[in-house]
Image: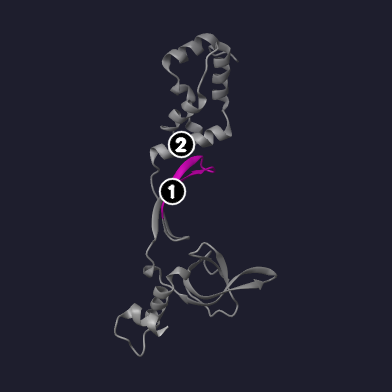
Amino acid sequence: MRRVTTDAIGAASRSSVSDAELRHAMFSGYADRLGKRRAEGSDRVLLASGHGAVLARECEPISGDYLVALEVLAAERDGVAQAQIRSASAVDRAWIRPSSATVEHWFDAAAARVRAARIERYDAIVLSEQAVKPDPETAAALLAAAWLARGADKAATRLLRRARFAGRDIDLPALVRGAALTAPSLDEIDVARQLPYELAQALDNAGGNSAL
């Protein structure tokens, strides 16, 4: 441990170091064992490897969200087998440098919209997440996929019925993808506006506004 401490605080060895210097040294030497509490104050931890662990009862109290797991053993707790951290050292967030930073998109079903965020990670651990404006093409693809998975709404169903009555083929997925490029939410996708003018006229002449 003295060797790791010396490497972290400089070439000149000291007979004593501060608590912060020692913790920094341990993080520098065992950064691959970084862990983050799954919730504030929780004893459950996500390790940088992606595996979960729990702070053992005999582990000394650790402040903050981040820690280095110095001793991890397979054990059983409350009848359940899980990795237990028996010795750990607190890590300051300022010491951690992200190993990756990506912009991720997803469909928010509750809001019926596509969201995006810039997410910084240290291996499997999320360090920060900042909302950003979605990429238009990526958002359109996700929005269209959600619309097609849900199925045609009433307006699109009427449109398809008129097309069958008129003997005309409609590429519904293509229309949905086109409409999604300008639609901010799932419910604002209007496939009828994507019809070529001639086809729209033909369908109007064939079915009009009837109950087809």
Q: Earlier in the sequence, mark 2 or mark 1?
A: 1
Label 1 residue SS: strand
**Dot 1 corresponds to which residue?**
104
Q: For the residue labelled by badge 2, is the local secondary structure a helix, a strand or a loop?
A: helix
Res. 104 in view: yes
Residue occupying the point 48% across, 30% down? 189
Quadrant in the picture for residue 44: bottom right
Q: How is the image coloured?
A: one colour
Horizontal and vertical percent position of residue 79: 70, 70
Task: Estimate the x, y position of residue 33 in percent, counting from the top left.
Answer: 47, 70
How many residues crowd mark 1 within 10 Å: few (<14), some (14–19), many (20+)? some
Name the amino acid type tagged 1: Glu
Real-space Cα distance between discs 2 and 1?
13 Å
Identity of the residue furthest to the front in this view: 3
17 to 179, vertically: above or below:
below
Question: Which residue is rendered at x = 37% and y = 70% of the image?
Answer: 95
Q: Is residue 109 magenta?
A: yes
Which stretch did the figure color magenta? 105-119
Position of the N terminus, as image quadrant, is bottom left
143 part of magenta stretch: no
Q: Identify which amino acid the numbered label 2 is placed on.
A: Ala
Q: Residue at x 50, y 9 (%)?
A: 205
Q: Main secondary structure of the magenta part?
A: strand
Horizontal and vertical percent for residue 181? 41, 32
Q: Callout 2 environment at 10 Å: few (<14), some (14 to 19), or many (20+)?
A: some
Q: Is residue 185 visible?
A: no
Q: Residue furthest right?
A: 79
Q: Is residue 39 above or below residue 59?
A: above
Relative height, residue 198 to residue 32 (above, below): above
Q: Residue at x 33, y 80 (%)?
A: 9
Residue bearing mark 2: 141
Residue 78 appears in which quarter of the rendering? bottom right
